[in-house]
Amino acid sequence: MNEVDERAIAGLMEIPWPPGQSPFHIKGVAYRGHVEYCDRIVPGGHAAVLAALGRPDVTKFFSQPFLASTRYDVFPLAMVGIGAARVMRTGYLEFVRERTRWQANEDVKGVYRWLLGFTTPEMIGGRLQRLIAQYFDFGDVIVEESSKGYIRTLRRGLPRPLTDWYAAVSEPYVEVLLGMAGGKNVRCTSLAPSPEGRAHGVDIVSLPFEARWA
């Protein structure tokens, strides 16, 4: 396990809420995608993932049905990737990135199919981080700079314990969608977070992203 994985996991283990109780939420479509991916790809399916995580409270949370447009506590989704990485014998954030690439491809076939109607990556570049932000009910995204082959955005209102997980979700998601829009050699990178204060008992940060493509 590398240093970034250790930091990400340590932060998630220190959150003050039991599963289902945090004030930070994500749409159920992300939970449905996670379970479907694990059942398709991970040896032993999602049951093996929950067993490897070893958190009965998270297992109980996952016993409910997830509705695509309903919002749920985001932290159990971030936590359960730890169990999946153990089963897959890979790094935690690497699992998150691979699962997100799969989710992005599935979203373009479904809820974001309309994106394929845009003819250039510049036409959708300014929308992508906002689309990702629509998954969540906290914070927002602003476009700080946009030009041919480049965009810089700022994700605000992000709980610090979620920072590394959020970066590992956003970077591949943006790369997949910009690539589908015709971008070549797309690279999305998160930069150093900046403190914004505290909310609901946790530190809040803003997280910049840069995306470049040919």
Image (cartoon, grey):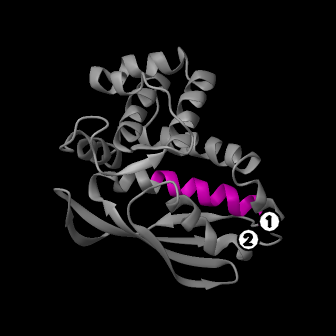
Q: Does the residue at mark 2 contact the one at mark 1 (Cβ under 8 Å)?
A: yes
What percent of the width, then of the height, locates residue 39? 58, 22
- Asked if residue 113 is among those painted magenta in the image, a careful observer would answer no
Disc marking residue 182: 1
Q: Is residue 214 visible?
A: no
Q: Earlier in the sequence, mark 2 or mark 1?
A: 2
Residue at position x 56%, y 41% in the image:
29
Count the numbered circles shown.
Answer: 2
In the figure, 136 relative to 198: above or below? above
Q: Secondary structure at mark 2?
A: helix
Side of 195 where 102 appears, left or right? right
What percent of the width, then of the height, locates residue 199? 21, 62
Give the dominant element type of the magenta stretch: helix, strand or loop: helix
Residue at position x 69%, y 58% in the image:
177
Residue at position x 50%, y 61% in the image:
133
Specify the segment rendered in magenta.
Answer: 168-182
- Asked if residue 179 is among those painted magenta in the image, a careful observer would answer yes
Side of 201 where 170 appears, left or right? right
Residue at position x 58%, y 54% in the image:
172
In the figure, 1 relative to 119: above or below? above
Which of the 4 image quadrants contains residue 138? bottom left
Give the position of the N terminus as an image quadrant: top left
Q: Circle 2 is placed at which residue position?
A: 121
Give the position of the C terminus as an image quadrant: bottom right
